[in-house]
Each structure stands twice: as C-alpha cells, then as structure tokens.
Image: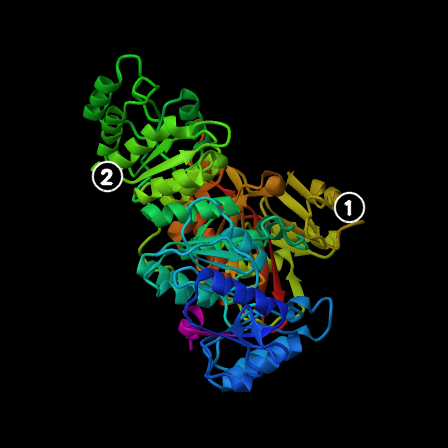
Amino acid sequence: MKPDLSRLLRPRSIALFGGGWAVNVVAQLKKSGFDGDIWPVNPKRSDILGVHCIASIDDLPGAPDASFIGVNRDATIEVVEKLSTMGAGGATCFASGFLESETETAGGADLQARLVEAAGDMPILGPNCYGLLNYLDNVTLWPDQHGGMTVDRGVAIIAQSSNIAINMTMQARGLPIAYVIAAGNQAQVGASAIAEALLDDDRVTAIGLYLEGFGDIRALEALAAKAHAKGKPVVAIKIGRSDKARAATMTHTASLAGDAAAGSALLKRLGIIEVETIAVFLETLKLLHMVGPLPGSAICSVSCSGGEASLMADLSSGTNLEFADFAPAQRAALKAELGPIVTIANPLDYHTFIWGDTPRMTRMFSMVMAETFDLIVFILDLPRADRCDPSGYQCAVDAIVAAKADTGARVAVLASLPENMSDSFTRSFMEGGVAVLHGMSEGIAAINSAIAAGRISSSEAPGVQLASTHAGTPVTLSEAASKDVLSGFGLKCPQSRTAATIDELAEASAALEFPVVLKGTGAAHKSEAGLVVLNIPNQQDLVAAAEHMSGTAQGYLVEEMVSGQLAELLIGITRDPTGMFLLTLGAGGVLTELLGDTASLLLPASRTEIEAAFKSLKVGRLLEGYRGKPAADIASLVDAAMAVCNYAEAHADRLIELEVNPLIARTSDAIAVDALICLNEEGTRP
C-alpha cells in the first residue's frame, strides 16, 4: 500500500524535537509565514523564538500532522515510535548514522531497520534528511536557510542530497519552485513515492528528480506511468556517470556498459528526461513549466547580432533543434519591414535598424511569431545595472511581451550568459508568459529536452525485466558451450570442433571445410593472448599453428572461416546491480573498446528498438551500404540480437553477463564467431 503523505506535505500542525536544529526550523516557519500550529517539544526551555515549548511528547495537544525530529539516532527511533502510536501524519528524520554510515560504523543498518519498524504505517522522510519545503502553503520544515519564496504554482524537486536541494533553492533563474523534498536514506518512503504524491497536487506542473540511486524500479515505473497520465513531465539527474565501469573480468560489454548506461536506458524507457547538470536541470524544468513539452522541433532564433545567430546555430548542432525556413509570405513581410540590407534567414539577425522603435519591433516580432514554429527564441543579453543603464533595452522587453500577447505563440528569451539577465527582467518576461533561459548552452539543452519530452510515446512502455536477487558462484561457459546453447535459441554460428590435444585437433578438422580459424582455449580475451590464428588454408598449417600456441592454450577450438564480412558487431547483455538487464549493441572485434560505438537498451527490447539501435551506431552507415559497398542483412542482425535476448529471458535467474563478439554482418545473414556466457552456478543447466 502506498503511503499517505498528504498530512506530512501540507500540515496544519507541526511538532519539533531537538535543540539548535529545531530552533532553526521554528525560525524558518516564522519567516515563511506558516499559519498553522507550531509545537516545539523541549523540557529545558519555556519557548523558542516566542513559541511556547511543550515539556514532553505526551503533553502534545494532539497528533501532529508533521514533525521534525532533530535528536540523535537512538532517540529518533523512540520519538518515531511514539508519534506513530498516537496517529501522527508523518515525520522527517534529521539524524545521520544509519545505513549510510554502515561502512564506517557498525550497527547503522540495524538501527535503520528498527526505525522503519518503529514508524509502522506513519510515513517518514530520511533518515539523514533535512526535510521538506512547501512554497505553496508556506511550510518550511527545514533546519537551514533556503532561497525559495511563496508561489501559486510551480515545479516539485525531490533530491537524495539535502545539500544539493539547498543549492537549488538558491537559484536566481526565475524558476517557480512549489516543493523541495529531501529524501535522505529513503528507509521507508522513496523518491518515487514522494514524487507520485506530489503529482496529485494540481499546482505542481513538473517533477524534478536528483537521484543517487534508483532503489525500487517498480516504484519508478509507477511514477512514470502516473506522470504521463497526468501530462506532467519528469526530469532527472542521475549521478555516478563518471564512475569507472565494472571491470571487464570476462567481456568487453561489462566495461562498455556500466551503471550509467543502464540508468540512462531506464530513464529513456520510462519517458523521463535525463540531463547532466544542475543548470540544465533547472532550465529544463523552467521551460517545461512555462510552455510544456514542445510538439515539434521547429525553432526560430531571433537576435540583432550575426554573432549570436551563428553561435546559436553552431551550439545547436547535434541536437534535435531544427531551424526551419520562414514561409514565403512571412519572408516577404519581414523583408518589407526590415529593408534590403537584412538577410531573412533562420536564425534571424534583424540588425539594429528598428531598435528603440517599440511599435515597429512589436510588429516585426509578431510577424515572426505568426508562423507555426514550435518555439520562438529571442537572444537578449541585458547590461548589468550596477555599471550600466539597462533602460535602453526596455523596448525589446516590451515588444517581445506585447507580441507574445498578440499571437499566443510559445516564446522564450535566452541570455547567452546566465548573469546577463537580471531577476527583475526575468520576472517581467515570465509575468508576460515568456520563458527566460539563462545561458546559451544551458538554454539550448533545455530546449532539446523539451523537444524530447514532446516526443515521448503515448503507448505504455513494457515493464523492465528484473533478475531475481539470489546469487551463486559465477561460472563461465566455454566458447563452444556458449555457442551451443545460443544456437538453440536461433543464433547462427560457424561449423566447429573442439580438441584437447594437437592429435585430436588434426582428426577433428577433417570434418570441416578449409580455410579455418584456430583458437586456443583458456583465456577470456584470446586475441590479446595470441590465441587466435585466422585463415589457415590446410591441415598442415593448422597443426603448426597449434604447436606455436601449445604453451599457452589449454585446448583448441577450430571452426570454419567466415568470409564476406561487411562489419563486425557486438551483442552483449549485462545485469545491473538493480537487477535490470542491459542489452548493448556496438562495433565489435578487436576495436570494440577503442571505438566505444555502442547503443544500450533495457530488456525486454522489441525488434523495432533493436533495429533502430543498430542503425544509430557510427558503423550503422556500413550496415546500410557505404561508398558503393552492399548493405548488410539488417533483419538477420536483429534476429541474432533477439536470439540473445530470448536466451537471457529464459535464464534471467542465473545470467550474469553474456557477449557475442564479433557478430559478422554479411549481405545475407549474420554469424557469431565468438561468444561467452557467465552464469550463477545455482539452478538448472542452461
């Protein structure tokens, strides 16, 4: 059953426990104008900042809707238990020293388990958590300064880091923030459950998640589904992208994939917009709050500088932004208004001939907004008021706002430098329905995210395939055994034979067609170990090659040489620590890690998704035919990937990682010339 957070998030009575930290919360509640009951519980003081203190929890006049618990970790458990027993609405647990400190001090995990047990059905935030800020209802259950202010509607931000949450409240970008919730350890209530509860507030326009880990994948799926149903976009930062990928103890895939790739694939599957920096996070939330997801990618850039126009175009390269041409009638009207010297193009440099003539600027801006661009962006940097006089730019502000009112178009103003748009001008624009983006790179990234939000499919995404949590001793199948089981699922492999000795090898090769490939067994990365010899023309050379590697090889695998290759590819599956299975498709062979040309999908993956992923690779141009070369059989490549996925689904309880590398793409088929599988020892045979 999902927790009822309504009383905790929008309380009418608040109890406070602790010393200095509780004093800070009282100060913030008074400063914000909270008009409910404040009940500090402190036997040593008569009042806190003029608010009467209550001697003990037993003397509370009723069960508080929300509580701030700022005592030590052992006392926190006692307070939580009493609050739960009396029917309180919820609490934030400030103390640290629980599960997050288990590696430094023993007992933290046990204490956290006791805390959850003590809470029972009463929802708690944390522990190791600052609390919550509700700027809609002036609820500042927060033991520190913050930079927010009362709003009528805005975005909700849930962060697993209290300090990052504080930093976000200090933004001077004009973003209206409705809620900031610090999730802390998420011992009982996770970030996804908090976000789900906030979606029910009609005053919340979008959700922002700052995630250090995903926790309950099913809860995140439920959040994404509910957000999509309500038409409220979700934006996320998932930290840990710079962590070293897991060591490739067996496959290249493990080093290429890593947790960041799995996290990105999950967010994409769920329709959650992923960004990389806090600045882009805030700018994206602001644009989505103001104009919502963009229905298309047609963007019009307007400035009075050729440099700004060129920079806008350059920085948009590689994004989804498309600077569509003006319609013929619109072009003619703009030409008549701006004169013969001005080139009518998008991005548009309208020069300064009309600057200062507000009616004429309004007329020209309205012409630009008259066409069906998905977003019109005005590049505008304003002089700093402490050294300059920005009043000469008021004409642009008034004209943009007036043109927006005349046309109802989606409009944004973008300052190329964040500091070149003051708070007062930001408010003026946003009160006129014009979004303000601070920083050209950040603004373009936000627009790109809004385009991506508009492209999210309305169809329900399939549930993410998760592995069971039990683990056994890893066992690696040989290449021959790996190919054998994958062949049973439809993967095409060359004819091959195994041999323990050179004498057996000569006999085994008689059943094969030369030329052949000889591989020495016993090493995961055979090429690096010098255990692969290609294109052996006859049995005599085969024996000679085997003798050369006899000091290293533990055995031999000989198989028919595959010719006619157009490209070498990789298909790999790794199991993320959360239990998700990540399918990695990429350039294969000995250059796999050097090229790093990969695309990642979560299982289950459809044929359509797999084909699109293959085509998205840099080597995708080879697959479609490059410089007169024939095209590869894409359908056969997809068949190979589906065979691997089907094996993974059938062995989800045991599979650790799997790799086919290389998979040879040819004009009529795709054939796997190497494969490795690592499984948990427990369970039935593959």
Between discs 1 and 2, the one toward the N terminus: 2
Task: Name the residue located 30 percent from the left edge and 33 percent from the top edge.
Answer: 398
Q: Which residues are magenta?
A: 1-15
Specify the quadrant of the image occupied by residue 313: top left
Q: Would you say residue 528 is visible in this rendering?
A: yes
> Residue 36, labelled with which disc?
none
Specify the quadrant of the image occupied by residue 116: bottom right
> Residue 547, labelled with which disc?
1
Q: CA distance from mark 1 to mark 2?
A: 83 Å
Task: Name the residue located 23 percent from the left edge and 40 percent from the top edge.
Answer: 408
Which amino acid type corresponds to the residue marked 1 in the rendered image? Glu
Q: Would you say residue 215 is visible in this rendering?
A: no
> Residue 405, labelled with which disc?
2
Residue 474's place in the image compared with 168, above or below, is: below
Q: Is residue 455 rendered to the left or right of residue 121?
A: left
Q: Dot 1: few (<14), some (14–19), or many (≥20) neighbours within 10 Å?
A: few
Pointer 1 with pointer 2, Cβ within 8 A: no
